[in-house]
Image (cartoon, rainbow, N blue to C red):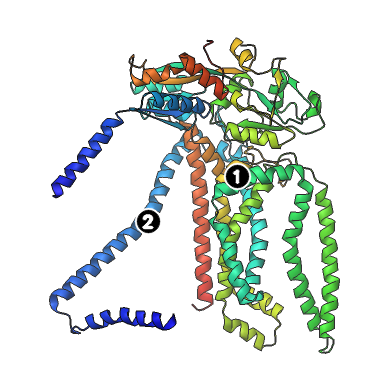
Amino acid sequence: MKKAVLSTILMAVVALTVVAEETIVLDGSTTVGPIAKAFAEYFMAMHSDVNVTVSESGSGNGAKSLINGTCDVANMSRPMKSSEFSAAAEKGIQPVAHVVALDGLPILVHPGNPVSELTLEQVRDIYLGNISNWKQVGGPDKKIVVISRDTNSGTYETFEKMVMAKKKICEKAEYVGSNGAIRQRVQSTPAAIGYAGLGFVDKTVKALKINGVYPSGATVQTGEYPIARPLFMYTNGYPKLGSPVHRFVTIHLSEDGQEIVEEIGFVPVTAY
Amino acid sequence: MLPHSKIKIQNSMTPPLQSSKRSLVMNASTSRLRRLGGLLGQGFLFSVTSLSTLTVFFIFYFIAKDAFPFFKLEGFREFFTSTRWYPSGDPAEFGTMAIFFGTGIVTLGAVAVSVPLGVSAAVCLSDVLPFNARQIVKPVIEILAAIPSVAYGFFALVVFAPLLQNHGGAVLAAGACLMMAPLLVLLVVVASDLIADRCFDLMRRKARWVAGLVLGAAAFTLMTYIGRQLGAIEIASGANALNVSIILGIMALPTVVSVSEDALQAAGRDLREGSYALGATRAETILKTVIPASLSGILAAVILGVMRAIGETMVVWMASGNAARIPGPWYNVLEPVRTLTATIAGDMGEADHVTGSSRFHVLFAMAFCLLAFSFVMNLVSEGIVRRSRKKLGK
């Protein structure tokens, strides 16, 4: 009797593992996270036998997971660093990049702020602390509250590279842990300035024109908007053609994929 | 209803009575079995207890193991003396003085909020309020300890920070009044009691009223003056040391109230009655007998409150602003600060052997300092409590 029960349980377990045969594990950037989640939903609706899990722990953690072999796809909002490539090579992992979408980094201010345009140099000076009052750039007489993403994020690294030109952000800058938190702080602080992904711009905050160009899908795609970046999914080697991972990382090239990317507020790489 | 339930109880009582009808002397095998069982139970409990003790040692060992490589790589000098924190820069800078300062000022602020409020609340609960009121108020204060810290953080970020920005002065004034009011009331009551004691028996009642009114008016004027001064201040960013200090103070409040109330209770009824028997008033009994007798317990409560505040992560990460610098004048609590715990939590993701080992180990060096500090504090509070028990002869 006992044996029979045991074997039934064993069979059930085997059957369960057979049903959800394939799993794709994604880890990494909180910016790429929404795209990955939408792709996962779309993918699982079409292939019910494949299980896709998405975790969001930051670009650095995504790279770490891929190198340690704990995920199949690393979502990253910045390219891999040479140190990460060499660590990957040591473990016999060969990271291959797939650019799934483009993203602009709008500079955000409170909607009540009359300033609507800055140059890239002015933004840099604000973050360096050389400009510390809004009246220096044509705004009201208010001390600027400088808000940045934490040094842990790909968004920060993109901003550091594209705006700060390797100079260090001033010490008085505040750091927050997510794009949503940036928007929250900016929409509730009249004198604040911050930056977040294009998908995070809504009516509650005002995106500034930079060098005369307003951040939008069109200006990011043409490269006119100066603070834009590609968003990556990294795999270990190019996935075997036709495998679930291969089908997953090529969703963005399909018409449906483009629609999904547009829907979440990012800029697609294709133009159907 | 009542007789019915009585019958039920009787029914349920009967079977054990019948079954306990066995010989009083155990036979040898039962005795051995019982002794073995006892030994097993003891062994199990001992191993569980020693496991939790070992855990503490393991935590120390593993944090130290990852902390020391940092000092080997970068030395002590920059870590303790520089205020420049650029762990991702090129070259990276690991000056943590501003971060230590941030932890310090936030903790001090939390103490400034929680200790006056907490200790006066404890005195009120143990010696002033009637028993029934105390039975309601104390559990309500202790509910504060059950709220998860992320909820506090959310409140600090979404409700309190915008409030500070939009109505900074008014909030400051109201807060200062709220904090001063219980202290001043206590002071006025005690002082008028003391003054009345110096009067003749017949005038005592009247003198108490007059002194209370005069002192109360003076205290009220002081409060409105300070309130008006604070009301003129404007706050640029609501995510600052003050915001976090207040929230941490509220989080530490239940600990401070609960432990110091226990200490005040432990002073005992005999001590109080002895004091009254010698002719002391209630104010004199509280100030000169009960509080001095339980001072070490109150100190232990304060230290526990400090540790609650110093180790809190989520609230400071969400609402302290995380700017790694010492504010303008150092006592300016309206500027953002960065704390050790928030830095460890916030920088852990990107820091790994992969991206440069100093950046990873510096976090452990900070964690080690934090751990060493709270360990010492814990020892101190333990020592204080033990000494106070000895003093009270318990």
Compare residues B9 and B83 and report the one nearer the observer: B9
As drawn, the label of residue B154 is 1
Residue drawn where x is 60% and y is 17% of the image: A228
Please state which amino acid type lies under the numbered disc 1.
Answer: Phe
Q: Whole-percent x and y of residue A172?
A: 68, 34
Q: Whole-percent x and y of residue B36?
A: 20, 68
As drawn, the label of residue B251 is none
B179 left or right of B40 in image: right
Viewer-nearest of discs 1 and 2? 1
From the viewer's perspective, is residue B160 above or below residue A84? below
Have a look at marks 1 and 2 and say if they share a chain: yes
Query: Callout 2: helix, strand or loop?
Result: helix
Please state which amino acid type lies under the numbered disc 2.
Answer: Ser
Q: Is residue B296 visible?
A: no
Q: Whole-percent x and y of residue B81?
A: 60, 39
Compare residues A9 and B62 and report the one nearer the observer: A9
Among the two numbered marks 1 and 2 on one chain, the one whose residue lies closer to the N terminus: 2
Query: Callout 1: helix, strand or loop?
Result: helix
Question: Which residue, given by chain and number where applicable, does mark 2 sit on?
Answer: B52
Q: Residues within 10 Å of mark 1 (few under 14, many from 20)?
A: some
Compare residues A259 and A188 and report the one nearer the observer: A259
